[in-house]
Image (spheres, rainbow, N blue to C red):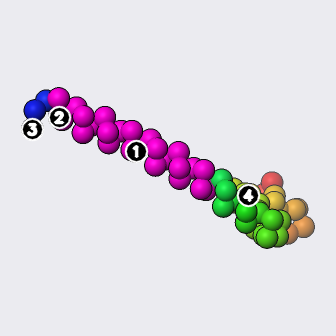
């Protein structure tokens, strides 16, 4: 394999990878928009970090100092 053939393979691989990535993004966006109309809002919420509410003074143990 010559150097130019190797470059052709590398360029072709890059082009195919970019095209497949763009195609996958379009399919994902299409499926997301398609299923959003069937899912309840409960399943569309983001799954971020949930923080606990600060403990109220009445729930603390009597030996804890503030």
Residue 39 in view, yes or no: yes
Which residue in the protein does label 2 denote?
5
Q: Nearer the viewer, mark 4 or mark 3?
A: 3
Which residue in the protein does label 3 denote?
1
Q: Are marks 2 and 3 in contact (CB under 8 Å)?
A: yes
Q: Are marks 3 and 1 in contact (CB under 8 Å)?
A: no
Q: Are marks 2 and 4 in contact (CB under 8 Å)?
A: no
Between 40 and 47, which is closer to the camera in this rendering?
40
Residue sitting at x 69%, y 59%:
32
> For mark 4, does the 10 Å Cα neighbourhood hold few (<14), some (14 to 19), or many (20 or more) residues?
few
Q: Are marks 1 and 2 in contact (CB under 8 Å)?
A: no
Residue 13 placement (x, y as % from top left): 32, 42
By secondary structure, the bulk of the magenta-drawn segment is best described as helix
Q: CA distance from mark 2 to mark 4?
A: 42 Å
Which residue in the protein does label 1 denote?
17
Pick out the residue farthest to the right: 58
Residue sitting at x 53%, y 45%:
22
Residue 52 in view, yes or no: no
Q: CA distance from mark 1 to mark 2?
A: 18 Å
Q: Is residue 21 magenta?
A: yes
Asked if 2 appears above or below 39 in the picture, the reply is: above
Between 28 and 55, which is closer to the camera in this rendering?
28
Residue 65 placement (x, y as % from top left): 78, 57
Q: Earlier in the sequence, mark 2 or mark 4?
A: 2
- Where disc 2 sits, the SS reads helix
Q: Is residue 61 left or right of residue 7?
A: right
Between 25 and 66, which is closer to the camera in this rendering?
25
Pick out the residue farthest to the top: 4
The magenta region covers 4-28
Residue 20 placement (x, y as % from top left): 46, 49
- Where disc 1 sits, the SS reads helix
Question: In the rendering, which numbered label is found on residue 33?
Answer: 4
């Amino acid at each position: 394999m010559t150097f130019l053939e190797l470059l052709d393979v590398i360029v072709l691989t890059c082009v195919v990878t970019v095209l497949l990535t763009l195609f996958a993004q379009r399919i994902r966006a299409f499926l997301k928009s398609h299923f959003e109309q069937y899912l309840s809002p409960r399943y569309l919420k983001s799954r971020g970090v949930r923080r606990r509410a600060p403990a109220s003074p009445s729930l603390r143990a009597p030996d804890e100092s503030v």
